[in-house]
Amino acid sequence: MIATVEHLLAALSGSHVDNCIIDVDSLEVPIVDGSAEPFIEMIEQAGITTLEAPRQFLRVLKRVEVTEGNRRMSISPASVFSVSCLIEFPHPMIGTQRYEIEIADGHFSQQLASARTFGFLDEIESLRNMGLARGGSLANAIVLTPEGGILNREGLRCADEFVRHKIIDIIGDLALLGMPVLGHVEAERSGHGVHTALVGRVLRDDSAWEIIDSSALETSVNA
């Protein structure tokens, strides 16, 4: 089992890489700066090769939804992969934020990749007391204070960095479906548990999806 894979998987998905071997010599993927940007840079440095085999897609055929209290997430049929996300936190630096994006034409690297993970100071202290989050620091996360600010001196990379990073997590978690997705995701106040619950519900329902290759996709588009 390898932990903390979502930022790397999101970078691969956002770069349209679906065939890759990665060597990991620990139990988790390095957090680096808390965003997906370092992985995008590594992918670009390694280079991307187009293979002769047709690319396979998981095409969503019907709407599937999971809810946990006020957390909700769904995926619906669409000709492309897109994500619409809403987050709400009672902190003046966040509040209510919304963002929607289609994962195409370099949008991931341009609009999402640099958004960092975030946490609340009191929660981080509790985790450390339990022996967790020992590698967490201002170098790899936005740390929000109870007084309404952040500890990071450099500030935010963009005003809605929080919701943009949440979409990185969504894309990385949905990469567990095993192949590029054709569907529209809507998420409200979601988290990793909700994301993986949706993945499980989709995969358990054979009528909710089909696997097609790129030649079939091109035919349907041209038709």
Image (spheres, rainbow, N blue to C red):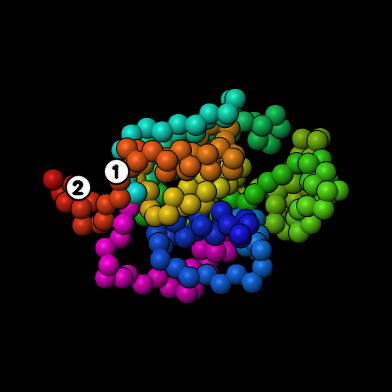
Determine whether label 2 and label 1 are within 8 Å by CB. yes
> Would residue 110 be visible to someone looking at this image?
no
Give the residue furthest to the top.
Answer: 69
Image quadrant where residue 183 sits: top left
Tell whether position 38 is magenta.
Answer: yes
Badge 2, how many Cα within 10 Å: few under 14, some, many 20+? Answer: few
Image quadrant where residue 148 sits: top right
Q: Amino acid at mark 2?
A: Val
Q: Which residue is mark 2?
A: 221
Residue at the (47%, 47%) spot, across then down: 174
Above or below 56: residue 121: above
Is tag 2's residue or tag 1's residue first in the polypeptide sequence? 1
Identify the element where label 2 is drawn: helix
Q: CA distance from mark 2 to mark 1?
A: 9 Å
Image coordinates for residue 58, horizontal then vertical, percent: 34, 49
Residue at the (70%, 29%) spot, across then down: 90
Image coordinates for residue 96, horizontal then vertical, percent: 60, 30
Image quadrant where residue 65 sits: top left
Query: Would residue 36 appear left or right of 101 to someone viewing this image?
Result: right
Residue in front for this viewpoint, 5 or 37: 5
Q: Amino acid at mark 1?
A: Ser
Give the residue furthest to the right.
Answer: 129
Image coordinates for residue 202, horizontal then vertical, percent: 42, 40
Query: Would residue 167 appear left or right of 34 to someone viewing this image?
Result: left
Residue in front for this viewpoint, 196 or 120: 196
Above or below 63: residue 103: below
Image coordinates for residue 191, horizontal then vertical, percent: 59, 39
Q: Which residues are magenta?
A: 37-57
Query: Would residue 43 appear left or right of 114 to someone viewing this image?
Result: left
User: Which quarter of the rendered picture does the C terminus lie within?
Assistant: top left
Q: Which residue is mark 1?
A: 79
User: Which quarter of the rendered picture does the N terminus lie within?
Assistant: bottom right
